[in-house]
Structure formats: C-alpha cells, structure tokens
Image (spheres, coloured by chain):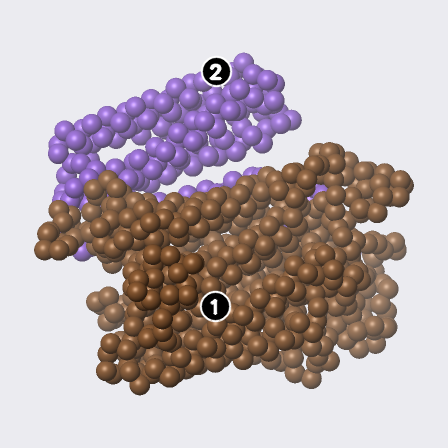
Chain colours: A purple, B brown
Amino acid sequence: MKPTKVPIWEQESSEAQPTLGMNPKKFSMWLFLLSVVMIFASLTSGYIVRKAEGNWVDFELPPIFWFTTAILLLSSVTHQLAFNQAKKDNLAQVKGWMFLTTLLGIGFLITQWYAWVYLVHINVYFSGNNVAGSFLYVLTGLHALHLISAIVFVLIITVKTFRFQVHSKNILGIELCTTYWHFLDVLWIYLFIFLMVFH
Amino acid sequence: MESIELQHHAHAVHGHGHDDHHEDHEEGTFLTKYIFSQDHKVIAKQFLISGIFWAIIGGTLSSLFRIQLGFPDADMSFLKPILGGWIEDGKLNPEFYLAMVTMHGTIMVFFVLTAGLSGTFSNFLIPLQIGARDMASGFLNMLSYWFFFASSVIMLWSMFIETGPASGGWVIYPPLSAVQTASPGSGLGMTMWLSAMALFIVSSLLGSINYVSTVINMRTKGMTFTRLPLTIWAFFFTAIIGILSFPVLLSAALLLIFDRSMGTSFYLSEIYINGEALPNMGGSPILFQHLFWFLGHPEVYIVLLPALGITSEIIAVNSRKPIFGYKAMIGSIMAITLLSFIVWAHHMFVTGMNPFLGSIFMFLTLIIAIPSAVKAFNYITTLWRGNIVFTPGMLFSIGLVSFFISGGLTGVALGNSAIDIQLHDTYFVVAHFHLVMGSASFFGMVAGVYHWFPKMFGRMLNEKLGYVHFWLTFVGVYCIFFPMHYTGIAGFPRRYYSFTSYDAFKTFGDLNSFISVAAIITFGAQLIFVFNFFYSIFRGRRAPMNPWRANTLEWTTPINPGHGNWVGEIPHVYRWPYDYSKPGADEDFIMQTVPFAETASSNLEGEEDLVEGEPIEKAHA
C-alpha cells in the first residue's frame, strides 16, 4: 500500500481516502535521530546540573576543535554534492564525493584524537576527580562513536554505488546517509557551542 | 505488495486453506516461520510467551521473599533445593533477599510489563487494527525480539552466579551500584544487569521506532487518525514515550559504567568503605537520580498506557456502547504523555531538593490527576447502562478500572511533597504503585490475552477457568496491597529484610503473615491461567471469525491469518470503531468496513452527507 499525500483536513467525506504518510524508512530514520538527540540532551543537561553544584574545574577547550569543526563542515558539503550527483545519475562523481567524504570523516576522527592528546597534555584526564574533563571525553567520544557508524554507512552506500544500486530511481539509501551525516555535523556544532558557553 | 496479493489468489485457486508464506515467496522452514520470523503476529507471540516466562519467575521471587516477611521465624530449609547456599541454617541470606527484591522489580517493570505488554500487543494489534500487511520494517522488528532475548538470557544468567544478581534495588542508585565492593551483588551481578539493560534499551527503541512509523505511515485507506481504535492511540503514545525516555536511561547507565570500570567520578564523592576512603571526589549521586527518573517516571506510563488502551477497547466492545468521550480519551492520553516528562522529581522530594522546586513538581504531579480522572470517568460512563457482556477479558478490564482508581487516589496523597516526607520509601508507596501500575497494567495485559487469544491462536480460552482466575486474582490483589497502606502510614520502610527486629513494627506480624498467604495464593491462581493458556493453544474450542462481535479490522482477517494478514485487498475503512448499539441499525455493531451508504436506517444527520461519492462496491474482507 503506497499512500499518497492527502491532507487530513481534506478527508471530510467518508469515502475511503488514502491516509497521509511518508516513506516509513525515512520516517524511522528521523525517529532514530530523535533518540540520539535525547542521549546528548540528557548528557548536556546532566552537565549543567553537575556544574550548578559547584566544585567545577575550568580549563581551556582544545583550540584544535575549530579545525575539526571545519573538516566536518566540509565533509557535509562533499556528502551533499554526492547526493546531488546521485540524483543526476553521475555515478562517477558520486563515487568521488563519497570517497572524499569518507576521507574527511576519518580526518575528523584523527583530529578529534589530537584534541584528546592536547587534553592529556594540559592534565585533563578521562578518569579521576575532574568531572568537567570526564564529561568532555564522554561527549566527544560518544559523538565520535556515532560518526564511526556514519562512516560505515557511507562505505556501504559507496559499495552500492559501484554495484549500480544508487541512482536517481533508487535514491533512498544515499538520502538517509546524507541526513545522518548532516545530523552528526549539526550535533557536533551544538556540542562545540555548548562546551564554549558552559565550560 | 501486488505480488503478495497475487500469491494469495493463487493459493485460493489451489484451495489452500492457509497461507503462512513470507513476502519473499518462500514457504519457510520451521526456523523462519516460528523462530526468526518477521511476521508481526509471530513476534508478538514470542514476546507474550517470553513475558509469561518472566512473570512466573518474577512472581516466584515475590512468593519467596513474602515467606521471609510473613514468617520470619520459619525454617526455610525446604527451599535449599532451589536456593542452595542462599539458605543458611534454615534462614534466607539477607543479601539474597535484597537481590530478590531487586530482580523482582526489574523483571516485572521491564521484562513483563514493558516487553511482555507493549511487545505483545503493539506488535500484534497495530498492523491488524490499522489495516497493514506488517510493520514498517519486519527485519528490525525481528531484531527487536532477539535483542530482548539476548537481554533476557544475560539477566537470567546473572541470577545464577556465585555472588548473586544486582541487589541495589531496581532503581540502581549509586553508590551501591557504582562501587563494586559495596555489596556482593554490586560486582558481576551489577555488570550483567547493566549489559542486559543496554540490550533491552536497544530492543525497546527498535520496537518503538517501528510502532510509530507504522501507525503514521501504513494505515489503510480511510483510516484517518480519528478513526483509529483507542488501543492504537495508546500504543502510539507509549512508543513515543519510549523513544524519548529510554535513551536517557542509556546515558545514565553509560556514566555509571564509566564510574564502575574506568575510574571516573560522575556519581561518586567522599565515600568510605570499612574506614578506607575511596579516591573519587566531586561526583553527584543526585545527578544519577535525575537521569534515572527522567526515564523512570515515563516508564510508569510506558507500562500503564497500553493497558489503558486495551481496556478502552474491551470495555466498549463488551458494554455494546460507543466509548464515552473518544476525543477526550485521546486528549487525556496526550496530556499524560506530556506530563509524564515533567514530573520526575516527585520521586526525589527527600533528596534535599529546594522546597520551592519541590512544590513546582508537586503541582505538575497533581495535574496528572485530571487526565487520569477523565479516563476513569469515561470508563465508568461507558459501562453505565451498557448491555454488559461479562467475558473474562471484560472482568479483567473492569478490575483494571478499580485498581486505577484505588491506586490513583493514593497517588494524589503521595504527590504532596509534605506528606511524602512521612510516606517516602514506606509500604504505602509499595501499595500505591503495585495497585496503579503493577496490578492495573497486569490486568490490562491479561484482559488483552483473553480478548485477542482467538485472533492469536484461532481458539478460545476456557471461560470458566477465566472466571476463577479473575476472582481469585482480583480479591487476592486487594488482600495483598490494601493492608500495606496501613503498615506504610505507620512508617514501615520498604526493602527491609526483617521488621521483627524493631519494636515499633512487631505488631504487624499477623498482618504480614496475612499478606504473605494472600500473595502466595494469588500467585498460585496465575498458574490456572498459565495452564488455560497453553492447554487452549492446542485443545481450546475453535474460535469463530468475530467472537466478540467487535468492529475493528482485525476481526475481518481469516481466523488464522497468514503473513500479510488479509487474503486479497486490504479492507477500506468508512467509520470510527465504536458504532455499537447504534439506533436504527440492524445489529448492535457496525464494523469499520461498512460504508454509510449501506446503513441508511441508522445514519445520523451529519452522516447522510457522507454517503454521496461513496463507491458502490464495498471492500470485502
């Protein structure tokens, strides 16, 4: 049953009308993103609650975060370009942009790792009694974990492109992948701004 | 979709009575049909049978610790074959008592009333009642069950390890749960608890995402939101609560895992064990409580709302009357959903919270009484002057209404932050939530099994055994929990191993024996149901197509529906699901698939206009 879009207010007549609806898979993706939002929302509100109790160690955020943010933003652009090319059936271009997205994603993870190296360098550790530091590791680590899953997703879509399974008539996979990637990008920007405001 | 329909026709031509095949055209072996099935109906039955299994274990645990509470001087050596080393010199080990209380709570809240209730009925009824062939993703649905299964295995396993299962209460507050040396159960038992719950959360999220996506996107033609049965509305909002609250438990558990194993101090500060100071400083155990109850309170409604939805449906069907206040019911479910997220701190009134903040949470908590009262009122007014058919399912639904009211009233008392100072963590709280959340939800679940058993297995449950089961359970539940209000007001704290050590509580000895006897008899009565359930699957009376003369779509499917639910086209929907005893109608029910054009004698004023433009041919089942 492929429902077409009929607004609910147009369904006054009792004649059996198709119900409103979108693609269930796309919809499920958004629900999944909602649950990821709740994980980070709860962690950042926990951060605020804990900070309000005082006894909070202040330290400089790693300056490399500016650089990592730029890389992630760039990867969002390349991913979007891949998606746009997929709509136009330029498969060679799709492969190229997806490849670049993967590289940038991995580059982001490596530079995030250097942020952790910097933290250790200024004596902010994951374990121990500095909860502010622990929170920073948890937030960045959990985001990185999600980004790893997104890279796996990108790789799967890239392989599918090589098998001619991604094209303008079969766009859903790469569309979901793009949504997820942009989401993690926005999520990182939220975390970065949050940390700048509340560190 | 077309291919399925074609196949159904092919089967009909060849005279096959059943069609258990999969969408991918294979007939399916035992393994793909019953074990790794993607059919929502089979997955629902898997959840139900796992839920029954867990309920027996959870009930057995409560009987065991009720023996300790009711008969503290009894010689418990006869339990040695089951409990082994946990019985020392005829006495129950106090650490194991705490472990049993913890596991009873965990099992009942999560494994029985979340997975067993939502897992069963959301899976079973959503596609059948909205007119869909299956869930949005059958694969994720299957995955959801198997994550739950893995979680169950780990949780069950944890009960048989040498140091015993987690024993810090089902709320796993740190430091008991965070410091591995705090109690025997805080070590491996707690680790396994956390692993099991992480898997459980994944399972629950997969399920919930599927439910919401299916309800919004997969409804049949004509099934507008205001024609959805209230069961679907309840499952829908339950799933939304799950999507929003379970991730928070995951975060709380994640930080707890870091505290336990990686030396962080999110929840730990200034703790001494045996005179030795722990190195952790700067953590906040209250932070855990905030995170936990942000899930914990919505969880109450994850447990209760499906039961309320099931009750709405069963009461309307068996009163032979439209549900009173259909839109008010939807509104109250929405209101409860919204409020469930902003009342969590009423579990924490005595944590040293700012009294002003406490009064805000008290205010919000008391507002929940309004949508709850709307629901109770609507159940009673639906019953009022109805043509009531007392099926076992109906009796259990009415029982739910009774518990919902008597348990809800004590909630109004507990929600007051001032009264809570006296009542916090006493048996009054135990009595309150066992009535309003435990027993009410359990009754909703059992009512649902009695009502939809014919659709699940094509056979009827034995009614006489059902009546015996109902009366023993209904009377039993009140005998168990009513006296607890009394001991609670007297100040007797929950989770204590023994009350006879305190002079103030010695007078409650007889009362506690009475509660224990009632609890064990009530648990025994559940075995009648278990017998009835498994016996009737194979030997029950064969069910007719629409045994309760109900309006909803699931009763238009074949008696034993195959994967895909309907043979041929999915029926279209022309009206709401509660046209019972409509004046002027030939029968006392008009199914949702009947167009207004065919019911000229009973159409109301506004409905006459709806006849025009009606397709002549009626969608047939």
* Image height of B63 relative to A61, above or below: below
* Image height of A57 relative to B511, above or below: above
Provide residue B317's location: percent of width, then percent of height: 70, 71
Task: State which quadrant residue A28 falls in.
Answer: top right
Provide residue B321's location: percent of width, then percent of height: 71, 75
Amino acid type of disc 1? Gly
Task: Name the residue rendered at 18%, 36% in the picture.
Answer: A125
Q: Which residue is mark 2?
A: A96
In front: B277, or B556?
B277
- Numbered circle sitting on residue B438: 1
Task: Name the residue rendered at 22%, 50% in the picture.
Answer: B181
Amino acid type of disc 2? Gly
Nearer to us of marks 2 and 1 is 1
How many numbered discs?
A: 2
- Numbered circle sitting on residue A25: none
Figure quadrant of the N terminus of chain B: top right
Q: CA distance from mark 2 to mark 1?
A: 57 Å
Badge 1 element: helix
* Image height of B306 relative to A97, above or below: below
Left or right: where B272 falls relative to B505? left
Task: Name the residue rendered at 34%, 59% in the picture.
Answer: B86
In front: A130, or B392?
B392
